[in-house]
Amino acid sequence: MHIRLILSLVAACTVLSAQTPLTLNQAVDAALKNYPAIRISQEQLNAAAAGIDLARTAFLPRIDALAQENRATRNNVFGLLLPQGVIPSMSGPVIGSNNTGTVWGSALGALATWEPFDFGLRDANVAVAQAARAQSEAAVRRSQFEVASATVDSYLTLLAAQEIVRTAQAGIDRAAALVRTTRALSDAELRPGADASRAEAELAAARTQISQARQAVEIARATLSQFVGSPPDQIAVSAGGLLQSPPADAPPMADFKANPVVIEQNATVEQAQAQLRALERSYFPKFTVQGAVYARGTGAETNGQRLGDLNGMAPTVQDFAVGFTVTFPIMDYAANRAREAAQSANIKAQTAKSDQIVTELKARWNVALAQLHGAREIALNTPSQVSSARTTLQQAAARYEAGLGTIDQVAEAQRLLSQAEIEDSLSHLAVWRALSGLAAAAGDLRPFVAEASK
């Protein structure tokens, strides 16, 4: 019995701990830690970093080793064979016969290949890999920024839905009071029964409104849960100072080039430029120093006789070679120029996209600034709107109870007050939402989150 009691208390404490209200700062931190998109970008960054190491391996010599055993016929003919990868090569003289007798053959060797210089091509390829890593780093920061922005928006949406529920509950209380009043007056035959029915209809409408508001709360909570990584039923948010208007200082004009979206796009431009530099260094002769050591064994004599037994299974004749090779793809000039032209056009397109992003961010800033000015004016006006609506309801209720007004006037006054209370409760959040829009356009949410979490 005692054990069950202890377990139930522990479970209750766990639930309470899980439902500890999140501040906006805590919600953003949880999203940056848990959201999968950030982990995806981080792994892409790791892959880009590995790409740099891969590009640097091109500076190292290449060493290939080979060991082979075979049993094959020894027939050989004079004549040319164009380069291909189908017919096996054969060495030795023409033996003047054509038969199916086979002998053992073996080979063992190693080939070292190294480019002493390459006119900067390998350095250019390393620069391409470094630019890819820089672009991936920018993509990580952009993903973090977008996740933080979405989390802030979801957080404010949940707060707004909760405020609507709170004000809707006040509307239900007033509608229920009106039902009691009309029933009492109807029972006393001071008012017709239709007034009670009308009041009950208003109560039903208020209940429908709060049901819709609660549905919006659950949807907003589910949306926020995907970012913070907790089940929706364990998410609670702390309004903090978000239900009060922030300081009225106008934010300074932002430097939109510091926005993570712009930084990522600029990194994409730099990556494309690095790729163009690599293309410009690809149409050069290729100089290769090669060295080989090898040994071969065969079970056939030069006159075509077979040695038999296991002769040829072990390499018995040794050789070595050192050489210097120059290759130059002369006919690749036109193709390389076409690739450079295509890459130049891609750079111009990516640069234009950077300018487009900055233009769109400026537009978002101006829209958010206009929303901020309008939200501040509304927040200043809604208290008087609520006060006037409350006075109107009191007067309408008093006239109705005195027999001087109608139920329609009371119902209309109640709806007017409920709407005014909703607008008042959301007016301060609208100011904060406009400020979040400015922060999103500027590309830095940290000052906003810090202020909103106080």
Image (cartoon, rainbow, N blue to C red):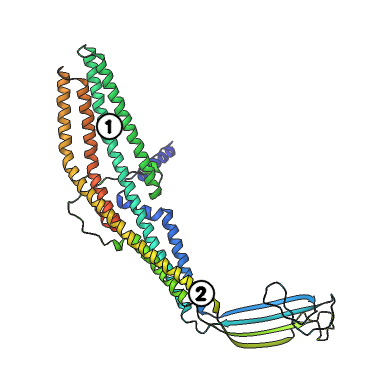
- What residue do we see at 28% from left, 18% from top? 197
- What residue do we see at 70% from left, 84% from top? 295
Residue 419, percent from left and from top: 23, 34
- 12 above or below 150? above
Quarter of the image holding residue 95?
bottom right
Q: CA distance from mark 1 to mark 2?
A: 76 Å
Q: Is residue 434 left or right of residue 147?
A: left
Residue 78, percent from left and from top: 76, 82
Q: Is residue 329 visible?
A: no
Q: Which residue is label 2 attached to?
A: 334
Q: Which residue is label 1 attached to?
A: 169
- 357 above or below 12? below
The amino acid at mark 1 is Gln
Residue 414, percent from left and from top: 22, 28
- What residue do we see at 25% from left, 35% from top? 167
Kindly identify which numbered label has been placed on residue 193: none
Quarter of the image holding residue 298?
bottom right
Q: Residues within 10 Å of mark 2 (few under 14, many from 20)?
A: few
Q: Nearer the viewer, residue 427 or 328?
A: 328
First of labels 1, 2 by sequence position? 1
The amino acid at mark 2 is Ala
Per the image, label 2 sits on a secondary structure element best described as: helix
